[in-house]
C-alpha cells in the first residue's frame, strides 16, 4: 500500500482538527516550507511527514549532527494517531516535546512514547534526538486470545 496523497481540505494527521494545508502542510511545501515557528509545531509536522511518506522533509528537519545518511520509510506502516503530552522551552534555541505516536503494521499495533529534543539554528528548528520511554509495545489487533501451553492474556 503506498503512502496516502494529502488532500489540502482533509483534517491534518497531527490531530489538531485543522485542514492539512493550513496546519502541517504549509511547513512541508510552499512559501513557509521548513519554517515551523516552534518545536511542538515542528514535531507535529514531522509526524505528518511520517504519515505521508515525506522522507525529504524529515531529513531536512533533522539536526545536521544527528541526521542519518538516508531514511527509508515503510509504506505498510500505518500511523494511527499522535498525542502531544507536553512541551517545554529550555531557552530560545532549545526545547523538548513529549509525545505518543500510535501505529499499525499488519495486525500488530505499536506505541512510540518519546521525549524529543529540538534545537533552533538560524531561525529554523531541527529534531536533535529523543529519549524513548516505551518503544513499539506490540500486541495483536484482533480480539483473538492466545492459546497453547505458553500463552498469556494480552495486557
Image: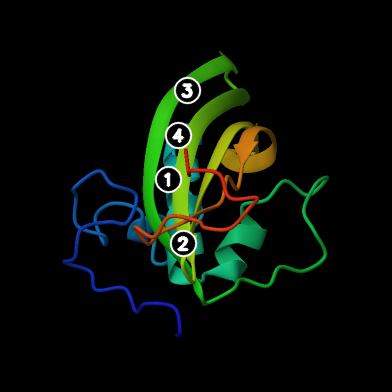
Relative to 9, is 23 on the left or the right? Answer: right
Front residue of this view, candidates 144 and 95: 144
Estimate the spatial distance between the alpha carbons at disc 4 and disc 3, rounded to whole Å. Answer: 7 Å
Asked which secondary structure carries label 3, the reply is strand
Q: Is residue 124 above or below residue 54?
A: above
Q: Is residue 72 above or below residue 88?
A: below
Front residue of this view, candidates 155 and 136: 155
Estimate the spatial distance between the alpha carbons at disc 1 and disc 2, rounded to whole Å. Answer: 19 Å
Residue contact between numbered discs 4 and 3, judged by CB atoms under 8 Å: yes
Circle 3 packing at 10 Å, graded few (<14), some (14-19), many (20+), is some
Instruction: Name the N-terminal-most of marks 3 and 1.
Output: 1
Asked which secondary structure carries label 4, the reply is helix
Q: Which residue position is annotated with label 2? A: 104
Q: Which residue position is annotated with label 3? A: 87
Instruction: Name the N-terminal-most of marks 3 and 2.
Output: 3
Circle 1 packing at 10 Å, graded few (<14), some (14-19), many (20+), is many
Instruction: Name the N-terminal-most of marks 1 and 2.
Output: 1
Q: Which mark is residue 5?
A: none
Q: Which mark is residue 40?
A: 4
Q: Write the residue at 42% across / 57% down.
A: 48
Q: Position of residue 139 (x, y in %)?
A: 51, 52
Instruction: Name the N-terminal-most of marks 4 and 3.
Output: 4
Q: Which residue position is annotated with label 1? A: 44
Q: Position of residue 119 (x, y in %)?
A: 66, 33
Estimate the spatial distance between the alpha carbons at disc 4 and disc 1, rounded to whole Å. Answer: 6 Å
Q: Write the residue at 45% across / 84% down.
A: 2
Amino acid at each position: 500500500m503506498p503512502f496516502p496523497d494529502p488532500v489540502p481540505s482533509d483534517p491534518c494527521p497531527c490531530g489538531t482538527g485543522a485542514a492539512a494545508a493550513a496546519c502541517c502542510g504549509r511547513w512541508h511545501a510552499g512559501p513557509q516550507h521548513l519554517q515551523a515557528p516552534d518545536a511542538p509545531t515542528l514535531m507535529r509536522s514531522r509526524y505528518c511527514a511520517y504519515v505521508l511518506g515525506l522522507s525529504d522533509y524529515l531529513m531536512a528537519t533533522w539536526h545536521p549532527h544527528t541526521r542519518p545518511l538516508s531514511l527509508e520509510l515503510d509504506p505498510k506502516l500505518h500511523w494511527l494517531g499522535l498525542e502531544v503530552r507536553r512541551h517545554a522551552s529550555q531557552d530560545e534555541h532549545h526545547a523538548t516535546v513529549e509525545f505518543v505516536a500510535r501505529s499499525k503494521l499488519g495486525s500488530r499495533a505499536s506505541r512510540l512514547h518519546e521525549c524529543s529534543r529540538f534545537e533552533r539554528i538560524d531561525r529554523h528548528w531541527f529534531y536533535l534526538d529523543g529519549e524513548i520511554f516505551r518503544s513499539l509495545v506490540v500486541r495483536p489487533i484482533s480480539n483473538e486470545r492466545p492459546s497453547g501451553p505458553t500463552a498469556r492474556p494480552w495486557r
